[in-house]
Each structure stands twice: as C-alpha cells, then as structure tokens.
Amino acid sequence: MTAIAIILQFLLASAVWAGNEGGAGFGQTLRPLFSARQAGTGDIALEDMWRNGALIEANTVLLDQGLKWMGLGAEAGVGSIFRANAELFSFSSSDVTKTYEKSDGTYGGTNGTEKVDETGGRVTGKLEVWKSDKWTIKAVGRMNGLFQSLPGMKTSGYAMEAGAQGEYRMGTESSLLAWGLGGPLGRGAQRGFANQWTVGSGIYGTRPKGWLADAEGYGAGFEASFLGEGLFNGNLGAVYWFGRPDVEGGTWFIRGGTRYSTGSIMSTRFQGGAGALWTWEDGGGLEFDLALVPLGGLGYFKYLTMTYRFPKPAPVNEVTPVEPAVPPANSSKPALSAGDKTKYFLPSRGQKAAVDVHVSRRSILSAQLLDMDGKHLMTLRSGDIVDPGNYRIEWDGSFGHGAMAKMEVPYIIRVTYNNMTMDVRTIPVNER
C-alpha cells in the first residue's frame, strides 16, 4: 500500500449518518467531522440530539501520520420549536512522499510528493412538529457540501438528508429516544447517489442522588446504518456524567462505545473518551472533550473538541407585574417593586397577578391558588412536563364561573418547578 493509498483510506473512511466505505469522489463518499462526544460514544450523537442554548464549537481530529481535520460550528435555537447548527470543516495534509512497486512487487523507491485537501460544510435544522405531555417529535433536515482535491483529480458536490427524532418522557428523570435519517441524496462527481439509511434508539436520564455526586446522569443507545452498496454499520455507545450540566459547577463525563463496519479497515473497533464542563452562574460554560478511535495498523484518530456555551438570557424576576403597578389613590399600599414578594393588582383594571419562573431543566411545572391557611382554592396550572425556559403563571382575581376573590385579602400562588416549591403572596385590591 502506497502512502497516497493510506491517505485516501483516511479520507474516504465511513461516517455515521453519511457516506460509505469506498470510492474516490464526492459521489461515493461524504466525510463529516465528528465531535469528540460523538466519537467517544461509538459515533452515536447521544448528547447532541437535545441540546439547548446557544454555543460555538471547535473540533480537530489528529492522525498519527500527521494528517488532521479541523472544524468550527455554531448552534442556536428559537425556544424549543426550531434549532439550527452550521459547521465548516477542512482536511489538510503536508506533502506526502509517493512510493511505488516494481513489477515483481518489491519496493521501487519514491516518486515525488502529493497533497490532499478537503473543505466542506453542513447546515442542520430541527423543527418541532408535535409535542404532548409525554412526546416530542422533531423533523430533521441537513444540507452538505464538499470540495475535494485528490491526487490527479478534483471533485465537488452537495447532498441532502432528511429524517426525524422522537422523545418519550418517562416522568421527570428519564426519556426514551428514537431517530432515523435517510440520505445523502444529491449529486457529485457526475453521479447521483442515495447511499444510506440510519435508525437508532436509546435512553437518556438523570439521577438526583448518584454514586459519587449529588446528581449524575446517563445515556445509552444503539444505531444501525444500511448502505446502498450492501454494507452494514452497527454502533453501541454510552455516556455517564457526574454533576449537573445546567447549574453552576463542574461536570465530568466518561464515554465508551463500539462500532462494527463490514468492509472497513477494522470490522470491530472499541473507542472511548472523557470530558469536563464548567458551568458559570449565568448559565454559560466551557467544555473540553477528547476521544480515541483505533484504526488498526494505521494508528488512532485523536478527537479534541472545545465548546463555549453562551450565558442564558437573564431570567425574568420571580415576581414581576404585568404592567407598572399603580397604587390606588389615597391608599397606603406601596407600589410593587420587582423584588417585592407581595403582588398587588387591580382586577377591575384587567390587571393580573403574575409569577414568572425560569425552568432550568426539564421538570414538572404546576401552580395552585391557596388561602393564607394553606387551603387549596383552585388550580392555575395542572402539572405537566416542560422544557427549560421562561414561563408565566397568571391569576385574574376570579375563582371561575363569575365568582371573584375578596378584595384586600391575601392569597398564595404556589408554583412547583425544578423539583422545588415557591410561594408568592398576592392581594387583589379595589380601585379607590
């Protein structure tokens, strides 16, 4: 095998959700860049399917022969409805000496050098199409583009992939996952192609009280890819972490997985990795991940990923008026300040008592109206599982069916979320 053949074997290696295991042009291969998280869990993107917030990420893949891939991406969403990820990546090699064989198969010496370059990118979008108390279904679409400069040829092409992912929530601490993706469908190197179908399933959850830390979490899954030329890829992966990624402090990750590929340089390979995340008080954070993936006699892929998480938007105050509160004329009642734990409002003006809360992790959100003795009066929001975000609980001063609360009498709005309970006193007042 010549040195150039080794390079091409790296360049045309298979990738999860895209590409195949052979060929010499974009029409036969697409090599997306993995993160170290995905590489560490057997090439299954267990941790990336349900990410929240805005982030930027840098990836690099180093090879023992001095070859490397590099990538840069950004990801953000609009609430839980839509999320997009854009990535640019490149492969480069320094000049590699070409070798050749004599007619009898013996070493024949060197014959100059060659250089291989590859640049590309992809954009992935996820759209929430259906959601209930238990289920969330998202449509997934991805556009890929690639330019290759190979020895003696240049190719370029594009491809699209489409699929879906679903989550079934089993209470507040765990979820079942399922996903599927078809493609790439596109054109490159003067040929069309439809090369791969991928399906997978897994479980994802948290443990409020773990073995070594107060909070821990886990994820595990399997994935199968059926390639158009008859080859098959199977993946198993798992991740376990110590800490709470959504609160201030450190979180440590351990990852492992295996990948079976027919027709590959290694039919079965075991891979793994680790990571560390530090989350700040404002919700921002910095994460470092690494993974090792063996390639038999060719050495190892060494994956390194650095992720910067932007701070979360400042949560609204725990108690805030719908509009600037105006004290009744000649009243000794103070105007409501943002930090006041008592909420005064004028039902006759259409004002409502409002309690705004920031849910930092998926949890049950409920709200009840109580009297000052703790007696339940009515339900303001029945308990349902919600995604992280800002939510508002409102009370208009009525008990329903035209019955109004007594004016100048305090009531309690009790809100339960993030596995905690908050009581807010509110008083409907008459206009004077």
Image: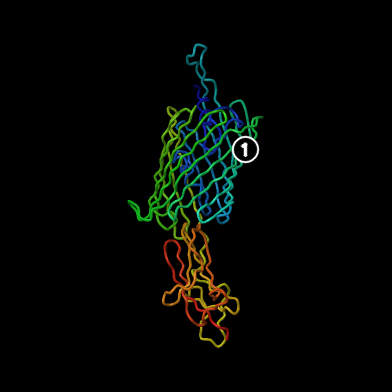
Instruction: From the top left corner, tell me how far across and down residue 395 is, in percent.
Output: 54, 72
Instruction: From the top left corner, tell me how far across and down residue 176 is, in percent.
Output: 47, 48
The structure residue drawn at horizontal position 41% and vertical position 77%, both measured from the top left corner, is 373
Residue 115 vs 120, above or below: the answer is above
Outermost residue to the right: 190
Look at the image and name its color scheme.
rainbow
Residue 36 shows in this picture: yes
Instruction: From the top left corner, tell me how far across and down residue 186 is, in percent.
Output: 64, 36
Outermost residue to the left: 212
Instruction: From the top left corner, tell me how far across and down residue 90 is, in percent.
Output: 56, 38
Residue 168 vs 118, above or below: the answer is below
The structure residue drawn at horizontal position 56% and vertical position 29%, both measured from the top left corner, is 115
| Number of marks present in the image shown | 1
* Residue type at numbered disc 1: Ala
The residue to which callout 1 is attached is: 159
Outermost residue to the bottom: 330
Q: What element carries label 1?
A: strand
Residue 233 vs 403, above or below: the answer is above
Q: In which quarter of the image is the C terminus?
A: bottom right
The quadrant in which residue 122 appears is top right
Q: How crowded is mark 1: few (under 14 residues within 10 Å), some or many (20 or more)?
A: many
Outermost residue to the front: 401
Residue 49 vs 407, above or below: the answer is above
Residue 311 shows in this picture: no
